Image (tube, rainbow, N blue to C red):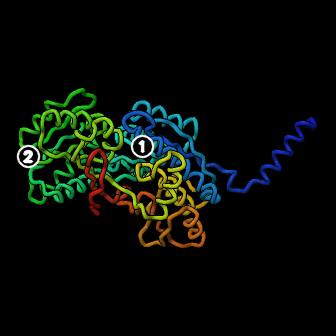
Amino acid sequence: MALLRVSRREWAALVGAAMIAAAAPAWAQDVYRVGALNPVTGAGSTYGSGMQKSIYAAVAEVNAAGGAGGRRFEALAEDTQTSPEPAVLAAKKLIEVNKASAILGTWSSSVSLAIQPLTQGSNTILMHTSSAPTLFSQNVRNLGWGFQSGSKYNGRAMNAAVKNEGFKRPAIMAFNNDAAVGNVNAFKSAYEAEGGKIVASVVYEPKRTSYRSELEKVVAANPDVIALSGYLPDTTIILREAYELGVNAKFIIPGWAAGPQLLQALGPEVSEGVLVYESVPDANSAAFKRYSEAYQKALGSSGEDNVFAAQAYDMVISLALAMEKAGPGSDNLAIAKEIRTVSSPDGQKVTSFAEGKKLLQAGQKINYEGASGPLDFDEDGNAVAIFAVSAITKGKYVRSYVLN
């Protein structure tokens, strides 16, 4: 039998590697990779960098507590550019090259819809902040989870705000995609179910330099409020043109179309009185405070400025707790089954991964209440958010009231 000759240098390297492996904790020898696929550039850039950094902060928290289900987390980041085509290429790289087992933090519905076939086909868990109804109806393998309330909840929130403000003649303007149209359709259903009537409705196309003709059509019906479901670029154009036309109707818009960039683009005079409905975190919760400290350290501003970052942080913690519940060696289908379980209202409330892991190892049920809210997922895998309404007043967002 031939002898294997090993040089002294090779032998020292082999011994050293063996010593490192022996010294490392068992959980550190198995890696679970997550792809932070966020809108760092494009229409969602207001939120994307904060989402990415919050994912990294949560990964560090999980690893500091010894990992999840016998595995260490590793995060790899890519930019969706808030556009389906580059997002698909980035998702393919994360799944096929980087071997990511989960994709976290896709923002716009067009992006999430574009990559969902990839994640479903590869048994990759997808956690997103998108609201398109199709994302949930096509979630056949229960691998997709929405941390931002979907269209049916956004529509109900819009309806509640319109009623609370006392408007009687609402009109609708919607960006032509599944999410935006889904939002206003849900609003219309809720409003008309209570005997109201939508006086005008227009669906407009993206990437236009003017929406004056669509706006004039809506204004001709004499509405007292225009429910505008779009994104930052088109919302900015429509609000500016409404001001130029002297439109008297109020506008109510979703939070993802607002933010500091809208105020900067329009100025205080043009933006005055615009109402914003949005999902909001529980700023008094322990989970939120922990997340907000990390956000402040990374970006120099309060975590309240970016609810999507809070949701991205919760994605990591929820996923890690589900892995811990599923146990070592569990595949993604088994892990996904536990995502709802670890946030079940009948469990003991926990607000951190370390706290939840300890109770799970003791055989107890847990209820993770996160930085972004209670995370009670419905039958479609959609978290039900807390909504609030703000009014833009003298160039600032002023919180008016919480809807639920």
- Label 1: which secondary element: helix
Q: Residues within 10 Å of mark 1 (few under 14, many from 20)?
A: many
Q: Disc 2 designates what residue?
A: 199
Q: Is 83 in front, or is 57?
A: 57
Asked if 285 appears above or below 240 in the picture, the reply is below
Q: Indicate the quadrant containing the N terminus: top left, top right, bottom left or bottom right.
A: top right
Tag 2: residue type?
Val
Task: Name the disc covering residue 47, or none.
Answer: 1
Q: Residue at x 13, y 42 (%)?
A: 201
Q: Is 204 in front, or is 44?
A: 44
Image-based side of 27 in relation to 157, left or right = right
Mark-to-mark CA distance, 2 and 1: 34 Å
Q: Quadrant of residue 384?
A: bottom left
Where residue 96 appears, x then y in whole percent?
A: 55, 36
Residue closest to the far top: 209
Asked if 6 appears above or below 288 in the picture, the reply is above
Q: Residue at x 57, y 56 (%)?
A: 330
- Label 2: which secondary element: loop
Say whether residue 338 is visible. Answer: no
Task: Name the disc covering residue 221, or none.
Answer: none
